[in-house]
Image (cartoon, rainbow, N blue to C red):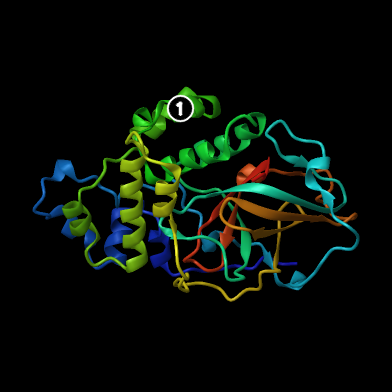
Amino acid sequence: MQPIKIYLPLVLMAGAIGLAATTAQAQFGGVTGAVRHLPVKAPGIPNILSGPQPISTNIKDAIWGDPSTDGFTPPGQPRQLTSLPRSPQGGFVLGPGYYIMHAQSYCLHAGTHGPGGGDGYLLGPVKGSAKDAVTSILQNSVAHPEIAQHDIQLLLWAIVARAKFEQLDPKLKAVAAKLLSARQLAGLNRSALSVLTNPQLASITGGMPGPVRTVIEAESRMRGMLTTPGSSYADIERVAVLGGVAPRGPGSLDLPATRWSKHPDGYWVRYKPNGYSNTWVEVWVPPSSKGVGKVYDPGTAIAVPVNTARQRLAQSGRIYTK
């Protein structure tokens, strides 16, 4: 079975705020030039169009969708994925068979819509400048069941929004210290941005496509909320997860929700999100496949929506409980 190569218009690569300045200029009619000549003092405006995105995974990276498996259900009753031996990073050592898990998942694309509408999700890698930190949070959280899922989500939103970790709530800083190394925390602080004022946002985002502008505005608001005492999870969630009916994003694919992805290690994975916070994960390992004995590590995977207006979802090896 050959992987499907999926190509996305370059405009989607600006879905988060970290495109290189030259790319942004090409996509948005010289936005970077406009930023350089804003009537606002340059030191007060972070160069949000330069440097890599903290998490950049998008549909272009989901190259393993397998159309030959559309509608396929493996034979027999599924076993719980958690019945398998665990790797030191919290992954699952695969044996032959059909497995299922109701897993905790996390929003990694603020300012977009949550799952819904029967859209499919494909396997993608964790990519971006914060790949190391995000993967560490997802993997290390398995060994810390005492940490609430909401706190893990807040840390991931802080990374995506490039908030200043040194200014987070003391409780969140304590959680971050459990899941990240001192080196990783220092790196996140170095890449943090300031909160933009409304005039700055208007100047920077003027002329940008609507979805890109929405993401930039959402991330700026979240930077402020995450570093302001008294901000509730519900308030931050309302900014990160858009309500209402999701539009069809540019470059979206018409693929069935039943499509599996063939992992490069020789087994198949299918994601069925039930909201951004939890995902039904199915893994199929045929007896004769090279996937037998390999490790499925949820912390290294992202469920990528085929509708680009929806959120990419980080996966974890933690069981979802309400």
Q: Which residue is mark 1?
A: 171
Marks counted in the figure total 1
- Amino acid beneath label 1: Lys
Quadrant in the rendering for residue 187: top left
Q: Is residue 193 left or right of residue 125?
A: left
| Closer to the camera in the image, 105 or 244 | 244
Horizontal and vertical percent position of residue 18: 36, 51
221 relative to 226, above or below:
below
The crowd level at tag 1 (other Cα within 10 Å; few <14, some 14-19, many 20+) is few
Closer to the camera in the image, 83 or 183? 83
Q: Closest to the observer: 233 or 205? A: 233
Figure check: 96 above or below 76: above
Residue at 53%, 63% in the rendered image: 59
Q: Is residue 34 left or right of residue 135?
A: left
Measuring 22% from the left and 54% from the top, which residue is drawn there? Answer: 201
Q: Residue at x 34, y 60 (%)?
A: 214
**Where the N terminus falls, by quadrant?**
bottom right
| x then y, percent, for residue 261 | 69, 61
